[in-house]
Amino acid sequence: MLVTRQPVFRKFWHAVMPLTELAHGPKPFRLLGEDIVLFLDADGQPAALRDRCCHRTAKLSKGWCVDGEGKACGQGAIQCGYHGWTYDRSGQVVRIPQYEPDRKISPEYKTTAYPCTARYGYAWVALEDPIADIPVIPEFDDPGYRTIFQFYEEWQTSPMRALENSFDNSHFSFVHRATFGVAASPKPSKYELVENESGFYAETVIEATNPVKFHAISGVTDAITTRHMRNAYFLPFARRLDIEYPSGIRHIIINCFTPIDDGRMQLCQWLFRNDTEADCAAQMLIDFDEEITREDKDILESTDPDALVDTRRRGVEYSMESDRPGMLIRKHLMQLLARHGEAEVHRGMTIPIVKAA
């Protein structure tokens, strides 16, 4: 599936950038193949515009924020770095330095503005009016949990590949054999799956190696421990993994696999823990999950990002019983496409040639 060719994905919120990235001025991002610029408005709220000035098409991300008097500042309107045309969060040009102060600016002078909001420490953007809410993360405001911002990085793969991998417990003994995978137990544990409107919930218990360096993370000292894994999928490209150790420690990972274009995605990852910094240092948790994540990244970047979604296409990819979560992801994506009058667009499609009459 080529995500940039599926219009329905433009109608969902995508986690685009940590708000801290915008503290020093506008930043560019490519979302679903579209170049956008993000900045903080005068109220400190994130805004997103098409990254093109309507004057001479320079990238607005080359500019900076200005206050009401046109002076450079950390947040406000965004000023183009080419001729100084200035835009508010609605995309309207509100100041042209070459004009006299009382000269009216045409309402036609504007660029595209996108729905943009702040949630969970990130700026979220939809390229069109969103048809679904941002997934709820109750731990973010729960004093019983601490929030650790782990990863914000580009991967050379697609959200579909990252999603199916995040529910695939048959790769642990191979991809993660150097970290938590148990090489002697290649047969995956069975998921209990429950579907819902926004995706599905998958629960299982797995074995995991627990070397001394991981004891503070798991809260137990056994050489082999268990992980009670409560995994949930949210349309189109998000998941929640709640890992509970026998110690009662909860290690909750939230992922948004944000589509950059047809071959790249942005990994956005939050971690929530019901322990304290004194129990296990945040940096240790980041290092722990980074080591595991690097193993996934290495293998996923070797796959074809144009993942098969419509399983009616035979002979492209083959599956086994443990791939059921990945097949359910495909089912929900295909249902979403069908509800919006779309079919899967993939690289091998033949585009019909329309001959002139």
Image: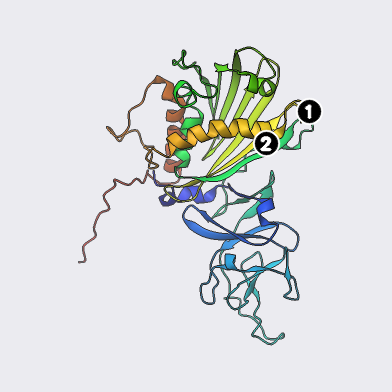
- Quarter location, residue 201: top right
- Crowding at dot 1, Cα within 10 Å, few <14 / some 14-19 / many 20+, comes out as few
Badge 1 marks a residue whose secondary structure is loop
Considering the image in quadrants, where does the N terminus appear?
Answer: top left
Please report the residue visible at 69 percent of the width from the left and 37 percent of the height from the top.
148
**Colouring scheme, one of rainbow, by chain, secondary structure, one colour:** rainbow
Disc 1 from disc 2: Cα separation? 24 Å
Percent coordinates x, y for residue 198 in the rendering:
55, 35
Residue receiving disc 2: 137
Q: Is residue 311 left or right of residue 161?
A: left
Q: Is residue 226 left or right of residue 328?
A: right
Label drawn at residue 92: none
Q: Nearer the viewer, residue 99 or 127?
A: 99
Residue receiving disc 1: 278
Please report the residue visible at 59 percent of the width from the left and 23 percent of the height from the top.
230
- Crowding at dot 2, Cα within 10 Å, few <14 / some 14-19 / many 20+, comes out as some
Badge 2 marks a residue whose secondary structure is loop
Q: Nearer the viewer, residue 135 or 25?
A: 25
